[in-house]
Amino acid sequence: MPLDDELTAWSRIRHDWTVFISVKDGDIPEKEWPCHKAALSGLGGYPCEYFIRLFDSQFQENDSQCSKVTFDSAQQAAIFPQFLGYVCGDGISTNIQSAEEWVAFVSVCDYFECSKGITEATAKISDALTTETCVDFFREATFLGQEIVKKKAFEVITKNFYSISHDIQGPLLNLPLRMFSDIVEYVKRDSNV
């Protein structure tokens, strides 16, 4: 049976796993997401090592057929449906637009150890990195600890520092002081100022 037919067959039957998503220190209520173990394990072509190990283990979650995940940010929880669509074989959603959404998607892929998702999303982020967007990507990646995206954004910022910083009301002024200081120190070192 071809892969597409298998996925279609899986989508017709009742789900066999549930992921409960909540946000640490958030006012957002826990949300339930019905899933299929086969899709989470990689039948759609996007394996998640987190779920593969979980399903092969003797953890309590296997008995209850559910996982409880607590994310650090509301944006990670909000992007989870796009992540589910991705691992089920739908590809990366065209609804992901902002730096905040892109970095959250990479962060969720990272959490569930979906390396193919990280690779594909960071490639799309590289295409979206411009002098207008790099500061937003840098800020979001720093907040969510996404070093790959942070490094890519940092490179664009430092290469274009003078054009980005020229505008007195520009995006660099919206960064927390520590992030701004890190950029300025790097630029000073790099340009021997």
Image: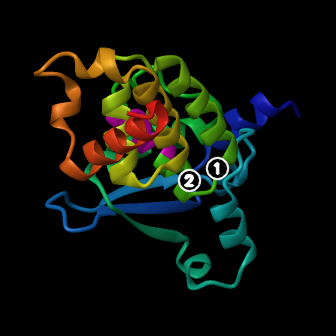
Residue 104 forms part of the magenta stretch: yes
Q: How many marks?
A: 2
Q: Is 179 displayed left or right of 39 in the figure? A: left
Question: Which residue is drawn at the image coordinates 57% and 85% (left, top)?
Answer: 60
Depth check: give the residue in front, 85 or 117.
117
Question: Which residue is drawn at the image coordinates 40% and 35% (left, top)?
Answer: 187
Identify whether 128 is placed above or below 68.
Answer: above
Bin the neighbour count of mark 1 within 10 Å (Cα to Cα): few under 14, some 14-19, many 20 and up: many
Dot label at residue 114:
1
**Which residue is farthest left?**
169
Marks 1/2: CA–CA distance: 6 Å
Image coords of residue 86 (percent x, y): 57, 36
Image coords of residue 67 (percent x, y): 49, 69
Q: Give, as a single range, the part of the protein colored magenta.
A: 100-106
Query: In this figure, which residue is indicated by the disc labeled 2?
Result: 110
Question: Which residue is drawn at the image coordinates 63% and 31% (left, top)?
Answer: 120
The reply to whether dot 1 and dot 2 touch (C-beta < 8 Å) is: yes
Depth check: give the residue in front, 30 or 138.
138
Q: State the SS at label 2.
A: helix
At label 2, which amino acid type do we have? Asp
